Amino acid sequence: MPGSQPEMLTSTKNPTIQRIRKWQRNARARREANIFIAEGIRLLEEAQHAGWIPQTLLAVEDLPPRGAALLDAWHASGVTPLWVAPHVMAAASDTQTPQGVLAVFPRRDYPLPVQPSFLLLLDGVRDPGNLGTILRTALAAGVEGILLPPGNADPYAPKVVRSAMGAHFHLPILPLAWDTLTERLHGLPIYLAEARRGIPYTQADFRTPCVLMVGGEASGPGTHGRELATHTVHIPMPGPAESLNAAIAAALLMFEVVRQRNADDALSLSNPPTT
């Protein structure tokens, strides 16, 4: 990295380290500080490539070449890391085997798209791993925003950020109250996924703008979600399982939207309008 390295931090009692440790553990503290934390070279490379600038950056010496290149790239943007001893990084980290680099990012406030074509609403997805996987899949499927009313896992919890594999740096995440959702989604078809009710999801018409709604696998969607939904669909299950994992169900639904729209586009290309 260009320039000389400052003195290394060796105390876990340092105020910055203490704040980071609190943020790792406490959702309210993260929310009040309006931040989230990401760790590891691969995840932070994704952040850097997407143009995110950390407000705090911790690093250990002797990073591998990719880690050093990452620090060089942020140094060019005016970011100077706080060099820490390995035991200090271990204290600040939420992982068992820290990769030697940790960043604190300010959250971004995204508006709800004015004319959305593809949104995902989650109702009661409380497992952090499931939520992170859903975020990652939503990014791959081209979802324009994730709507998170109260009752879901904290989307900025460390496990969610790790599981999402960089989705936080590209995908608008919108925590919104149910009243706001009712007002803002008025007029859009909202497809609620249920275990055994409604039409098979492949029979729904997802070619026009729509909202998909997926509930938690333990209790399913709540009262607000059921009242907001305009359509109900299910994923046929020939076997005796009661339900699918929420992340799996969400993936099937999202990529059915992709399949239908790709097929519609292909049909339009093969049958151009006549003049």
Image: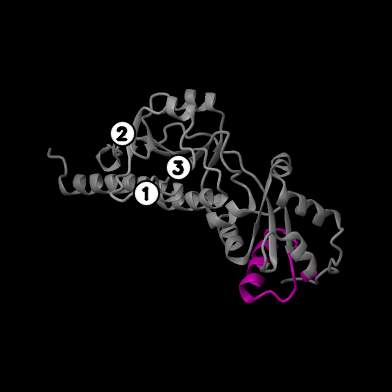
Spatial CA span between label 2 and label 1: 18 Å
Quadrant of the drawing holding the C terminus: top left
Which residue corresponds to mark 3?
144
Mark-to-mark CA distance, 1 and 3: 31 Å
| Between 163 and 10, the one nearer to me in the picture | 163
Residue type indicated by callout 2: Gly
Which image quarter: residue 2?
A: bottom right
Q: Where residue 140 sits in the image (x, y, percent)?
A: 42, 53
| Residue 46 image-quadrant placement | bottom right
Q: Report which residue position mark 1 lands on.
A: 241
- Residue 7, magenta (yes or no): no
Please tell me which residue is depicted at 74% across the width and 43% down the height of the picture: 29
> Tags 1 and 3 in contact by the CB under 8 Å rule?
no
Find residue 199 and report its image quarter: top left
Residue 142 seen from this side: no
Identify the residue at image location x=69%, y=65%: 101
Q: Nearer the viewer, mark 1 or mark 3?
A: 1
Q: Residue at position x 41%, y 46% from top?
A: 250
- The residue carrying pointer 1 sits among few (fewer than 14), some (14 to 19) or many (20 or more) residues within 10 Å by Cα, namely few
Residue 62 within the segment the image draws in magenta: yes
Residue 75 drawn at (x, y percent): 70, 63
Mark 1 or 3, nearer chain start: 3
> Disc 2 versus disc 3: distance between alpha carbons?
25 Å
Residue at the farthest left position: 274
Q: Which residues are magenta?
A: 59-86
| 237 left or right of 146 in image | left
**Looking at the image, is mark 2 or mark 3 earlier in the sequence?**
3
Percent position (x, y) of residue 15? 85, 53
Q: Which element is circle 3 on?
A: loop
Where residue 167 sits in the image (x, y, percent)?
Answer: 52, 52
Badge 2 marks a residue whose secondary structure is: loop
Q: Which mark is residue 198?
A: 2
